Amino acid sequence: MSAPEYIMPGVYLQEIPSGVRNISGVATSVTAFVGTARRGKYHQPTRVRSFAEFEQLFGGLWLRSYLGFAVRDFFLNGGSEALIVRVGRGGQLKASDLLGATRRKNRTGLYALLKADLFNLLCIPPYNAEQNVDATVAQAAADLCEEQRAFLILDGDRRWTSAHEAAQAMNAGALRSANAAVYFPRLRYPNPLRGDAVETFPSCGAVAGVFARMDVLRGVWKAPAGTEATLDGVAELSLALSDAEQGLLNPLGLNCLRKQPRAGYVVWGARTTMGADSLASEWKYIPVRRLALFIEGSIQRGTQWAVFEPNDELLWANIRLNVGAFLNQLFRDGAFQGSKPSQAFFVKCDRSTMTTDDIANGRLRFQVGFAPLKPAEFVVLTFMIQTN
C-alpha cells in the first residue's frame, strides 16, 4: 500500500488490513443416515431439517425399515440437520446393496456419501434379517468416516441378551476404530404402526440426536453422556444394566444406556471403539476424537487461501496468526486444558517444520497441538467424619 500524500495540516485516517483471515468452525452434527425407505431418490444424499420433511420426501415410518424410526429419534432428541441416502429396493438389505468396488466408483450405496460436501456423524440403522449391521458394512463405514473426518454411531448386536454376552463379543475382536462408537442396549418405545405396542428399536438415531444437542449446548469437546444426555421418547431399555455390569462393559469400550434416578434414560458412556483400557489409545474418548476432527476440518477449509501463495516467511507468519486466532477462541470457549493459551495449544510453522526440499517444491507444512479436556469418568469422593 503506497503512503498517502499529506498536503495540509489535519487528522488523516488510513485503513490497514489486519492480515487475519477468519477460520470458521465447520459444522459438527450433520448426520448421515443410510437405509431403505418407501420412496425418495436413490443413492443421493438428501438434506432434511425436520421429520416432517423426511415424511414428505421419504414416506416417514415404515414397518419394513428402521430408517424412519431412527430419523424420528434423531430430531426428537435434538438433531437439526440430516442427510438421507436411500438404498435397496425392499425392506431388508444385503451388504452388497451398500458395498463394493463398483459402488465406490459409481458413488452408490454407502459411497453415495462421497457426493456430500460434509457430514459429521453416520448412522446405519440395522437392516438385515438379524436386525443388525453386517460386520463388513460396519468396518467399511468406519473406514469411510476416517476418510471423511466423520464419526460412526453403531448399535450393539441384537443377539446380545446379557452384559456377559456383550463382553464376550467385545473381547472377541469387535470393530476397532477411533472414529466409531457402539451403544448397548437398544431402546423400547410404542410403535404407532402397530397400535402403540412397545417394541425394540435401534438407538443410533437417538444417540446422534444427543450428540447434536450437546454440541449446541456445551460444544463438541463435551462428552455426549451424563445426566444432560437424556434419551427422549424412550419407554424402557431392552436390558436394564446394573452398575456391576456397566463396570464390566465400560473398560471394553462399549457405551451403556442406563436409567438414572431423576434424569431418566441417558447415555452413560463416551468411549470410541478404541476405548478399551487394554488398548491405551490416545483416541479413547469420543469428545477428544471429535474435537480433533473438528479442528482438522476447520483448519483444512480455513487455510485454502494459502494455496499458491509464496512459501516464505510472510506466509508462515500469517498461518501462525490465523490458526492461532482460531485456537485461541476455542481456548476461551473452554475447549482445552490449561490456564493460559501457551498451556493449551501451539502452532508451529517455520523452517523447523519444512525441509529445503519442501520449500522449493511448494509444500507448506505446519504443526498444531492442543491439550484436550478428558471426561471425568471416575469421580472419587473422599469423606472425613470428625468425631468429638
Image (cartoon, helix red, strand yellow):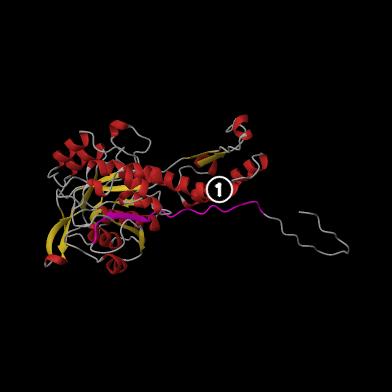
| Left or right: 213 as drawn, with respect to 353 | left
- Considering depth in this image, is 380 or 346 the residue closer to the camera? 346
Q: Which residue is mark 1?
A: 303
Measured as percent of width and height from the top left, residue 6 is found at 86, 60
Q: Is residue 141 visible?
A: yes
Relative to 181, is 27 above or below?
Answer: below
- Which of the 4 image quadrants contains residue 213? bottom left
Q: Amino acid at mark 1?
A: Thr
Measured as percent of width and height from the top left, residue 257 is found at 22, 50
| Left or right: 29 as drawn, with respect to 189 | right
Which region shows up in magenta? 18-37
- Which of the 4 image quadrants contains residue 309? top right
Q: Mark 1, residues whose alpha carbon is within 10 Å: few (<14), some, or many (≥20)?
A: some
Measured as percent of width and height from the top left, residue 363 is found at 58, 37
Q: Magenta stretch: residue 154 in it?
A: no
Relative to 54, is 155 above or below?
Answer: above
- Considering depth in this image, is 42 or 72 the residue closer to the camera? 42
- Considering depth in this image, is 95 or 291 the residue closer to the camera? 95
Looking at the rendered structure, the number of numbered marks drawn on it comes to: 1
Quadrant location, the N terminus? bottom right
- Which of the 4 image quadrants contains residue 55? bottom left
Measured as percent of width and height from the top left, residue 243 is found at 19, 44
- Considering depth in this image, is 197 or 387 the residue closer to the camera? 197
| Left or right: 80 as drawn, with respect to 87 | right
- Callout 1: SS: loop
Instruction: Give the residue displayed 26% in from the left and 62% down from the top.
Output: 72
Q: Is residue 379 visible?
A: no
Quadrant location, the C terminus? top left
Relative to 278, is 92 above or below?
Answer: below
Q: Main secondary structure of the magenta part?
A: loop
Q: Magenta stretch: residue 29 in it?
A: yes
